[in-house]
Image (spheres, rainbow, N blue to C red):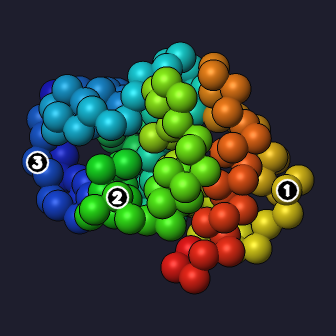
Amino acid sequence: MANYTLNINGVQQEIDVDPSTPMLWVLRDHIKLVGTKYGCGIAQCGACTIHLGDDAVRSCQLTVSSVGEKPITTIEGLSENGDHPVQKAWLEEDVYQCGYCQAGQIMNASAFLKSNSNPTEAEIETAMNGNICRCGTYTRIKKAIMRAATSENA
């Protein structure tokens, strides 16, 4: 076991865990932030996507010991009132179906738009390629990302 101080959603969190513990389980089991979902456990589905600094990363394979001092943002910390442009676009385009993968989709999309504020449809498809939606809402996801990109707050 080791003691870590992590900046999660702007709050310093002290935890004592094994250095090899994936951040997914630190967030869900130790910090009690359950918006980040377990999907596959092998970084292939994207349900567990969070931000490490400005980068979208898969928390199921990110060990707590590899985080260092970089800030972590989860879906709970993306915006205070669910009013991030991507979250608003998700609602406006009625993206949700079962909703299980959507936190990871939103986290990946918001990181992507931070680095590319005027994407083409092909760039969106490439950026979102690793996030799986079992309900198949890909068309609405793409429309929501395009909407968020054109919003004045993106």
Q: Residue at x 56, y 44 (%)?
A: 94
Of labels 1 and 2, earlier in sequence is 2
Q: Which mark is residue 121?
A: 1
Of labels 3 and 1, earlier in sequence is 3
Q: Between 42 and 118, which is closer to the camera in this rendering?
A: 118
Which residue extends farthest right?
Answer: 122
Query: Mark 2 falls on what kind of element?
Result: loop
| Residue 7: x %, y % from top left | 24, 59
Q: Residue at x 88, y 53 (%)?
A: 122
| Residue 70: x %, y % from top left | 37, 61
Q: Residue at x 76, y 73 (%)?
A: 118
82 is higher (above) or lower (below) than 18? below
Q: Is residue 124 left or right of residue 150?
A: right
Q: CA distance from mark 2 to mark 3?
A: 26 Å
| Residue 52: x %, y % from top left | 44, 55
User: Which class describes the residues within 10 Å of circle 2: few (<14), some (14-19), or many (20+)?
Assistant: few
Query: Mark 3 falls on what kind of element?
Result: strand
Q: Which residue is mark 2?
A: 82
97 is higher (above) or lower (below) than 141? above
> Is residue 61 visible in this depiction of the protein?
no
Q: Which residue is mark 3?
A: 14
Q: Is residue 149 left or right of residue 47?
A: right
In the picture, the quarter occupied by the N terminus is top left
Query: Mark 1 falls on what kind of element?
Result: helix
